[in-house]
Amino acid sequence: AEHPVKLNYQSDVARLRKIVINSLYSHKEIFLRELISNANDALEKLRITALTEKSVWDGTDSLNITIKAVKDEDGTNGRIVITDTGIGMSPQELSTNLGTLAKSGTSDFLSLAEGQEGAATGNLIGAFGLGFYSSFLVADRVQVASIPPKTDRNPNPVQHVFSSSADESSYEIFEDPRGNTLGRGTEITLYLKPDSLEYLETNAISGLVNKHSSFSSSFPIYLFERWTEEVADEEGLNTPEVPEPSEALNVPSTPDEDDEAIIEVASEHDEAKESVLPKVKNVTKEEWSRLNAQPPLWARDPKNISDQEYNLFYQTFFKDFSDPLAWHHFSGDSGSGVAFKAIVFLPSRLDAKFWQTLPEQKPKDVKLMVKRVFITSDLGDDSLPKWASWVKVVVDAEDLPLNVSRETLQSNRFLKQLKQMIIKRMIQLFTKISEEDPEKFEKIQEVYGSIIKLGAVEDSKNQAKLTSLTRFSTNQRNKTSLDQYLENKKHGQKQIFYLAEIGKTPELLSQSVFIEKLHARGYEVLLLTDPVDEILVSNLRQWKGIPFQDVAKAGLQFGDEGLDAEEEKEQQKDLDEKFKPLLDWLKLEAKDIVRNVVLSNRLVKSPCAVVANIDGYTANVQKILSAQNS
Ligand code: ADP
Ligand code: MG
């Protein structure tokens, strides 16, 4: 056999592994969730690859995950073996995937992990792709045997082993001395630490799988229960085949000891062999139980699912480390005749870089499954628009042809309708919360207030519904909808007044000279401080037939009680005449700075204000437009 290759971890890996181990000590149980999630990913990868590369998997042998706990004879030690029949890893992949950090989020993880509670860090692990390292929470030695599928391009894969100990800064990769025992896939052996032997109990394992993984894996998970012995006659009639014993790796830690590599055969089997009698033989039989027999969460009746189950599912399935803000679980028929089940989740926060990276935003978390099997999260031309790209959705369609290539999937009518349907349900969810749960809606506004406004600008088809969901600060109250504004408008008021200044607080804006008189006379004025506010308002131009009026621009009209339009005009004429000499003098004096000087009907205490031309863009919109063009 070839000599083991000894390799040093990237320095970051060693450092990270320490942090993971230290910060998660009290939540060490997450190791199983992470390893099952990896096995699930590997099975999914195999399935997806097989769609275009038939030789990878012919569709006959079963795709599953097995977990087996093996106690040492004297009960003092033991190991857990997790095996999947997934895509497997070549020796190079073993090294790159398990010995180096391919992901870029390392420093983000480190800064987030510091000062986090253990539980929060636990969820970060999965989100940042550090799942494999959680093995060392319970094991002081981890061995990963793996072999990629036999394909036309790779007809003779060789099973290799990645081996590493918790306190070492190096790992080894070598050809598996047992040969190709797996056929295809990956087997992870955790040599448990003395303080983690509780996981040798099948009850502990099934409990963990039920808690963390039962609804997130679409492949069957089997747990080894026990060996049973059966007596059979000489011909072995009515007896199952003798199973292959589970072999533990016992490999040398240094290259020189290579020749002494031995294969340790599980003690159970030894016993079985010893008890062989003439004429009648004892046959050992493995008993396995299926752990995740219940259908995945989205396929279940929402009435029987607790909030906690939704939260857990969301965190594991989408690798987010906090609970979702809200969700909508529904089933239906998209109109194209495809029956489906879906859950739309609103995350509790947006990606920190969402706004900076808006032009490149592409949804990555609309997960399309067919008959419970993941197909793609790339909906191509039918992707959600940018404003909705953050939403997390799982959709399981009943009868899309399973073996379609992704190209044909792209042109499927179902996808087109899916996109519309997700948006419709998102808006319904927002609307329902706005009507039924003011407290939650406040949170929605905090996270998605600007997004909803962006949607109202971008999505002309849903503009009215999205605009109804927008909220604005005013000089009179904290948050109002446009409908509430209209209900509150004064008798005869013909305009929706607003003042826009991006980046200021509503409090500061409310003291502006532009709204003095309006405020004094009891008018409500929208205070627009969000960059998207002003774009929305100039895009809408009116709401329910009432035009928007920038109070910093000319063209302000009052419809005050007591003064009708005629009287107001008369009054204005008198004033214009009275102040003509002053205006003429000011115009002359300031002719280089302003275009015109007029009498104001908007000021109460301030002597004068500089305003924009009625049809000119305000300073703010000018700023935004020039930023877009540059
Ligand atoms: P993540 O799963 O987020 O990528 P992990 O640390 O959990 O991060 O796993 C690292 C990588 O190791 C995976 O991306 C995958 O390429 C590989 N890997 C881990 N477990 C398996 C497995 N059971 N089968 C195949 N590849 C695996
Ligand atoms: Mg993982």
Image: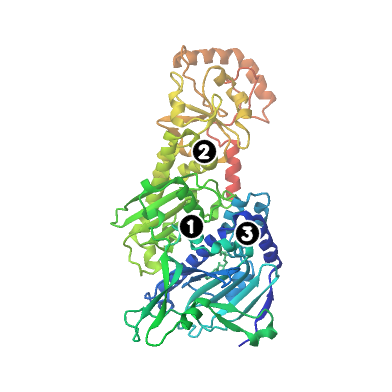
What label does residue 207 carry, if any? Answer: 1
Residue 233 position by quadrant: bottom left
Which residue has dot 2 on it?
445
Determine whether, in the image, residue 382 is placed left or right of residue 364: left
When asked about the image quadrant of residue 433, the answer is top left
Instruction: Give amino acid for label 1.
Output: Gly
SS for dot 1: helix
- Give the mark, 1 or 2, whose residue is nearer the N terminus: 1
Using the rendered view, name the quadrant where residue 577 is placed.
top right
Choose between 479 and 548: the one closer to the eye: 479
Which quarter is ligand 1 in? bottom right
> Which residue position is annotated with label 3?
105
Cα separation between marks 3 and 1 = 31 Å
Query: Do the CB atoms of the residues marked 2 and 3 lie less than 8 Å apart?
Result: no
Amino acid type at mark 3: Gly
Neighbor class of circle 2 (other Cα within 10 Å; few <14, some 14-19, many 20+) is some
Mark 1 nearby-residue class (10 Å; few <14, some 14–19, many ≥20): few
Location of residue 526 in the rendering, given as x and y in whole percent from the top left corner: 53, 29
Taking the spot 29% from the left edge, 53% from the top edge, the residue there is 335
Q: Is residue 107 left or right of residue 367?
A: right
- Give the residue displayed 58% in from the left and 63% down from the top: 197
